[in-house]
Image (tube, grey):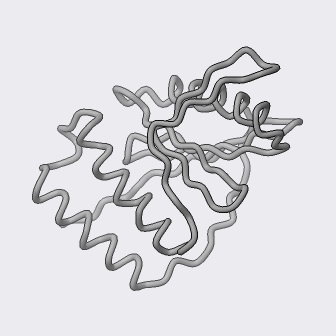
Amino acid sequence: MEDFNLQASPVPHKVVEELHDRLVQIRKLYGDIYSGKEAKRQVFIMAIIEAVCVMLDDATILVEEDVKGKNVHVHGRFEFVLKRGRKHISIVEAKRDDIPQGIAQNVAGLEALSDVEGLERTLGIVTNYLEWVFISDDDEKIRRINETLKIRGS
């Protein structure tokens, strides 16, 4: 898997402030993320996914999506799928912080999705909330970029 550069879109300051406030609120309610199980991490991850969808305005969130390949014999499972028109970003939560296993699960699911939907390029994310791996899977190569969420005082 080779690395690629991700061109980030500008995020309005208001969205960043609202997301920050929401994450602070979640932290007060659920406690620190370092001590959490998968269900707790999903609450934090959902706040970020929701903020992205609100910013895009016409995106929706699908939850616990399964994809079964037709020509490729793979079954994919995603915790979340961001859907905007024909574009999908399939998201897998890395269980027990096992990012490599999450990447394998996501790539298998992306292959199944590409097969079923007839897509030339599929996009995925693997995250444990603190670490985010963005994946681009096309006919030629699978590429990735890693980002870490930086948490400054509450």
The residue at 70%/55% (across/down) is 87
Q: Residue furthest right?
A: 140
Residue 35 image point, x, y percent: 18, 38
The residue at 73%/56% (across/down) is 86
51, above or below 151, in the image: below
Q: Quadrant of the C terminus?
A: bottom left
Along the line of sight, the residue nearer the viewer: 153 or 96: 96
Q: Residue furthest top?
A: 73
Q: Quadrant of residue 50?
A: bottom left
Residue 104 image point, x, y percent: 60, 24
Residue 148 image point, x, y percent: 45, 51
The residue at 68%/34% (across/down) is 110
The residue at 30%/71% (across/down) is 20
Tell me if 41 is positioned left or right of 87 in this view. left
Q: Quadrant of the N terminus?
A: top right
Along the line of sight, the residue nearer the viewer: 68 or 146: 68
Along the line of sight, the residue nearer the viewer: 65 or 132: 65
Tell me if 26 is positioned left or right of 92 in this view. left
22, above or below 134, in the image: below
Q: How many numbered badges does the structure rendering display?
A: 0
Tell me if 106 is positioned left or right of 113 in this view. left
Tell me if 114 is positioned left or right of 110 in this view. right
50, above or below 141, in the image: below
